[in-house]
Image (cartoon, rainbow, N blue to C red):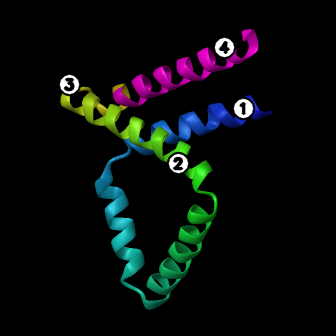
Amino acid sequence: MVWILAVVAVLLLSGILTAPLTNVKTLIFRWFRTDVGAFLSIITTAFFAVVVVAWLHLFATGLVLLSAGALARLDIQTYGFKKWQGFWILTVVSLAGLGFGGAAKFWF
C-alpha cells in the first residue's frame, strides 16, 4: 500500500511540475476576486503555516524533493523538451530513484 501511494505521489508531483502555469494563475486570480475566496485562502494558509512550523522536520524533506523537481523542470525546459517529454523524463527518473531507494533499503 505504501508503494502504491509513493508511485501516485511521484506521478502527481511530475504532473504538477509540468503543468502550464498560465492555467494555474487564472484559477488563483479568479479565486481571489471574491471576498469569500480571499478569506478562506488566508485562513487556510495560516493553518498550513502552523502545521509546517510544528512539523518542520517532515516538511523539510518534502521541500527538498519539491526543489529538486523544480530545478529538474527548469533544466528540461532549458534543453527545449516539450511538456509531455518533460513529464515522462521526470516520472521515469523519479520512479527509478524510488526503486533504487527501495532496493537499497531491502538489501541493506
Other-residue count near label 4 (Cα within 10 Å), few / some / many at <14 / 14–19 / ≥20: few
Q: Whole-Å distance between the Cαs marked 3 and 2?
A: 29 Å
Residue type highlighted by circle 4: Ala
Q: Secondary structure at mark 3?
A: loop
Q: Circle 1 sits on which residue?
A: 4
Magenta stretch, residue numbers: 86-108
Res 83 quadrant in image: top left
Q: Please name which of the two marks, 4 or 3, marks the residue nearer to the observer.
A: 4
Judge depth for marks 1 and 2 and give the one in front: 2
Q: Which residue is mark 2?
A: 60
Mark 1 element type: helix
Categorize mark 3 by other alpha carbons within 10 Å: few (<14), some (14-19), many (20+): few
Q: Is residue 86 left or right of residue 47?
A: left
Identify the disc placed on residue 104: 4
User: For mark 3, what is the residue?
Assistant: 79
Does the stretch in magenta take in 96?
A: yes
Inspect the image, locate mark 3, and give the three-letter code of the amino acid beneath it.
Tyr
